[in-house]
Image (cartoon, rainbow, N blue to C red):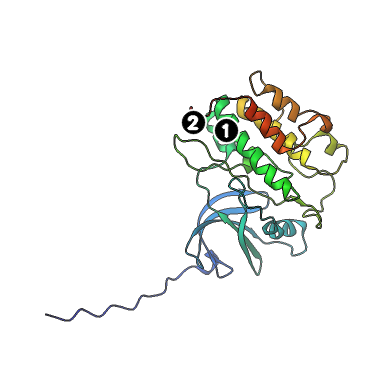
Amino acid sequence: MSPPAPRRARRPRRTSPDRLVGGRYLLHEHLGTGGMGSVWRAEDTRSGEEVAVKLLGQHDPGSAALLRFVREQAVRVRHPHVLAPLGWVAEDDRVALATTLVRGGTVEDLLAEHGPLPTTYAAALLDQLLDALAAVHRAGVVHRDVKPANLLLEPTGTGRPRLPLTDFGVAVVAGESRLTRMPGPVGTDGYLPPELLDGGPATPTQDLYAVGVVGTQLLTGHGPLAPVPPGPLAPLLTALRDPDPSRRPADAAAARATLRSLHLPLGPPWS
C-alpha cells in the first residue's frame, strides 16, 4: 500500500488591498450608495461571517458626517427587530461600520416594486416597527429617521414578513452628546412632525409621527404627503400623524397595543 501523498501547504488568499478595510472587512459586492457612504456585502475575516459594511471614504476627520458614522456603533439595542452595529474599523481615509447582512432589500424597494400592500401585510410590518421603537425608546434613543429606506426585510418567501429597523446615524442618545450637530431639524422631509419644523426638541413622538407616515405609504404606495386612506388602520395612522404631539399615542407600546386591538387576521396574504 502506497503512503498517502503529502498535502500541499495551503497558500494564503491574496486580496486587493483596497478591498480589505482595516485589516478585517473584505468587500465583495456593492449593494448601494446613500448620503453617508456606500454599502457592501463583505466578509468579516476575523469571524468568517458575511456582513453588511457601510463604508465612508475621503472624509474630513473633523466633520459631523464622520462623527455620526463612527458613533452609530454606540447604539446597541438588542432586539429581534433592531439591526445593531457589530463593530467598526478605521484606516487612513476610510471608516467601515459592520452590521448583520439582511438580504431582502428595503420596504422602499418593496413599495417601488409592488405598490400598495394588503392591510394585513402592512399591519404586520407596523407591529414589528412599533415593537422595535418601543425597545429603542426604552434605551433612551430617538431614531429621528424612520422611513421605508431604513426598514429592511428578511427574505421569508411566502411566510410572515420580518422587519429590522436600521441606520442610527442621526439618532439622539439620552444623556450623551448629540450624534449630530447640524443646524435645524434632523430627519427626512415628509417624515418630520410640525413641532420640529418650529424648532422643538427631538422626542420619541417624532418617531411615532414618522410611523404614521410610513403606515400611510404602505397602504397607498405613494409618497409621504399622501393622506391616510380609509380602512381599519385609519384611526391609528391618523392619531400617529396628529399635528399635536400630545394627541398622538403615549408611546410605541401603546400604539402597538392599539394596533393589536384591531384583531386583524394574522395569516396570509404575505406574498
In the rendered view, does 16 fall on the left or right side of 96?
Answer: left
Quadrant, the N terminus: bottom left
Quarter-of-image position of residue 231 = top right
What residue is shown with label 2?
A: 270
Which of 118/192 is in front?
A: 118
Residue located at (66% from left, 38% from top): 130
Image quadrant assignment for residue 208: top right
Helix, strand or loop under label 2: loop
Which one is earlier in the sequence, the residue at label 1 or at label 2? 1
- Answer with the quarter of the image where residue 24 lies: bottom right
Figure label count: 2
Residue neighbourhood size for the residue with mark 1, other residues' Cα within 10 Å, grouped as few (<14), some (14–19), many (≥20): many
Q: Can the viewer see residue 116 in this picture?
A: no
Q: Are marks 1 and 2 in contact (CB under 8 Å)?
A: yes
Tell me the kind of residue under disc 1: Ala
Mark 1 secondary-structure assignment:
helix
Checking the image for residue 64, the label placed there is none
- Residue 150 in the image: state x and y as whole percent: 63, 43
- Rendered position, 109 above or below 6: above
Q: Residue furthest right?
A: 199
Residue lying at the far left in this picture: please name it: 1
- Give me the residue at 46% from left, 36% from top: 159
- The percent coordinates of residue 270 (x first, y second) are 49, 31
Which residue position holds label 1?
A: 124
Question: Is 32 rendered above or below residue 61?
Answer: above
Q: Residue furthest top?
A: 230
Q: In this rendering, would 134 be left or right of 269?
A: right
Residue 197: x percent and y percent?
84, 37
The amino acid type of the residue labelled 2 equals Trp
